[in-house]
Amino acid sequence: MKPRVALIGECMLELSARGGEQPPSALQLGYGGDTLNTAVYLARLGVAAEYVTLLGDDRHSHWMMQCWQAEQVGTGLVGCLGGRVPGLYMIDTDSSGERSFSYWRGESPARELFDDPGRVAKLERSLADYSLIYFSGISLSLYGEAGRERLFDMLARLRAGGARIAYDGNYRPAGWPDADRAREEFTRACSGADILLPTFDDEQALFGDADPDATLARLRSCGAREMVIKLGASGCLVASDDQVLEVPSCKVAQPVDTTAAGDSFNAGYLAGRLLGEPAGQAARWGHRLAAEVIQHRGAILDAQQMPDLAGADSGEEHG
């Protein structure tokens, strides 16, 4: 049977400059969100991925659902709030492929996923048979204090029932006006997870870690047994089974758009692990997929551009 993963978060409508020109003379419409991006790539890699969110009942929400279903991402756990519309963001990229975002998401229905205790109880029953539950720091930033408490309680019960929990810190300061609260919530999330997938730059920005080894030591104190600290172009540190490996990234001559680099890495890594690969090889899967993603605009590659991860060579040149 395929491993089953449920991914919790928000997907928004995405506007980006057609052809990457700045300032744009035309915009193209897509969709994206960190956990949804990971869900799409997991589904393409042979993992049964189910998305967990709330959308509206407008035509754009229906369009996104149809797109996810075409990608074989499960939508049985996507709820609907009548009269609402999804959030929206716009991507701007500079000459080196680094991106910046503008958001219109204050009334996004996804923010209310954990507001209703009855909805949460029903969701927990539906998730009881999943082998892995995945969420991120962006997911956490959506929900108010009461919603986060219900999320953490639900995850703890699911974990006690045998599910594994995967968490990517993915810290975005704009989502956390109170950095002290962010540190508290991120630490709690790490303490309740089995697999951690942070990016060092994010961890340094939030916790002031001096170097990746300091991040590794801090996260180990939370109790996680498996960690991957993403280091951008420098690769990653993989800590699993009391071993620490340095896995280099794939070389890319000129990144075009780094949107979803971490999300796609996470998908490659988790797919590798769920399909039986050792941690080091799973990290190479993640690097190979991320290297392809950052050579194209937008968060989601065309399906025909997906690399063959099983044949990945960590020393291969790209671009």
Image (cartoon, rainbow, N blue to C red):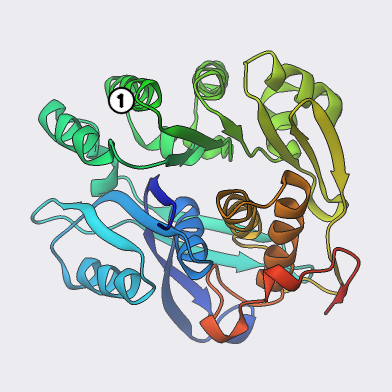
Place residue 64 in its image quadrant: bottom left
Q: Is residue 107 visible?
A: no
- Where disc 1 sits, the SS reads helix
Drawn side of residue 150 relative to residue 94, left or right: left
Q: Which residue is mark 1?
A: 154
Residue drawn where x is 23% and y is 38% of the image: 112
Quadrant into which the C terminus falls: bottom right
Q: Is residue 188 left or right of residue 149?
A: right
On screen, residue 144 versus residue 19, left or right, reads left
Please name the residue shown 72% across and 47% down the image: 278
Against 289, residue 70 (above or below) is below
Q: Say which quarter of the image contains residue 24.
A: bottom right
- In this rendering, the answer to whether 10 lies above or below 42 is above
| Residue nearest the observer in this picture, 143 or 106 | 143
Tell me if residue 94 can be seen.
yes
Instruction: Tell me what residue is drawn at x 68 percent, y 75 percent.
Output: 308
Query: Which amino acid, by three-letter code, is at mark 1?
Result: Met
Q: Quadrant of residue 103?
A: bottom left
Residue ID at (28%, 46%): 110
Please give left or right for residue 69 compared with residue 115 in the image. right
Quarter of the image with the N terminus is bottom left
Picture coordinates of residue 113 (x, y %)? Answer: 24, 39
Q: Position of residue 248 (x, y in %)?
A: 87, 53
Q: Looking at the picture, does residue 153 appear above or below residue 43?
A: above
Q: Residues within 10 Å of mark 1 (few under 14, many from 20)?
A: some
Q: How many marks?
A: 1
**Farthest-out residue, front:** 1
Point out residue 306 in the picture as x, y percentages from the top left corner: 61, 77
